Amino acid sequence: MKKIRTLALIAHDQKKAEMVSWAMKNKQSLSRFNLCGTGTTAKLVGDATGLEVKRYLSGPLGGDQQIGAKIAEGEIDAVVFFWDPLNAQPHDPDVKALLRIAVVYDIPIATNTATANYVITSTLLH
């Protein structure tokens, strides 16, 4: 029996519309994953696609750290994180910690639509 992989979805405020658009275009591929995400991003993606997305806290309120903990516990297999490199984030240390933990645990982390498309279609995750 194949393990269903878990994919975390995160997007900064200026990237939420891009995440929703990407998720809608990739709904069929995303339906093959258990999905989770930080606060508003999870809600927006779930509402737009009709897919179940487990919600963690908002990123600035600890959601990034919750997802990092799940990576460390082996419960998340990949992350799609549309972060905004042009605007300072009040929770920047949490963002860097999440990126660091993904690298430490060798978890694919896609930071834009091009890499997100590669990640969700990779035969290595299915």
Image: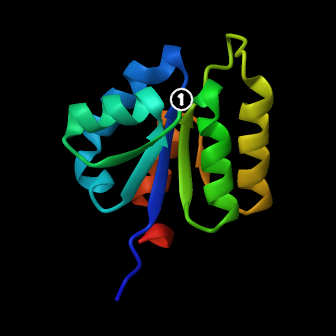
Measured as percent of width and height from the top left, residue 93 is found at 80, 29
Query: Would residue 107 be seen by someone viewing this image from the given angle?
Result: no
Callout 1: SS: loop
Choose between 82 and 97: the one closer to the eye. 97
Colour pattern of the rendering = rainbow
Label 1 CA crowd tier, 10 Å (few <14, some 14–19, many 20+):
some
Residue at 54% x, 34% y: name it. Answer: 112
Residue at 46% x, 32% y: name it. Answer: 39
Q: Is residue 111 left or right of residue 104?
A: left
Choose between 1 and 112: the one closer to the eye. 1
Choose between 104 and 29: the one closer to the eye. 104
Q: Is residue 2 left or right of residue 93?
A: left
In the image as oriented, which residue stretches furthest toward the left?
50
In the image as oriented, which residue stretches furthest toward the bottom?
1
> At label 1, which amino acid type do we have?
Ser
Measured as percent of width and height from the top left, residue 58 is found at 53, 29
In the image as oriented, which residue stretches furthest toward the top?
87
Residue at 29% x, 44% y: name it. Answer: 26
Residue 78: quarter of image: bottom right
Residue at 63% x, 38% y: name it. Answer: 64
Residue 108: quarter of image: bottom right
Q: Which residue is mark 1?
A: 58
The number of callouts visible is: 1
Q: Quadrant of the N terminus?
A: bottom left
Measured as percent of width and height from the top left, residue 44 is found at 32, 28
Query: Would residue 51 be seen by someone viewing this image from the given angle?
Result: yes
Measured as percent of width and height from the top left, residue 88 is found at 73, 12
Q: Quadrant of the C terminus?
A: bottom left
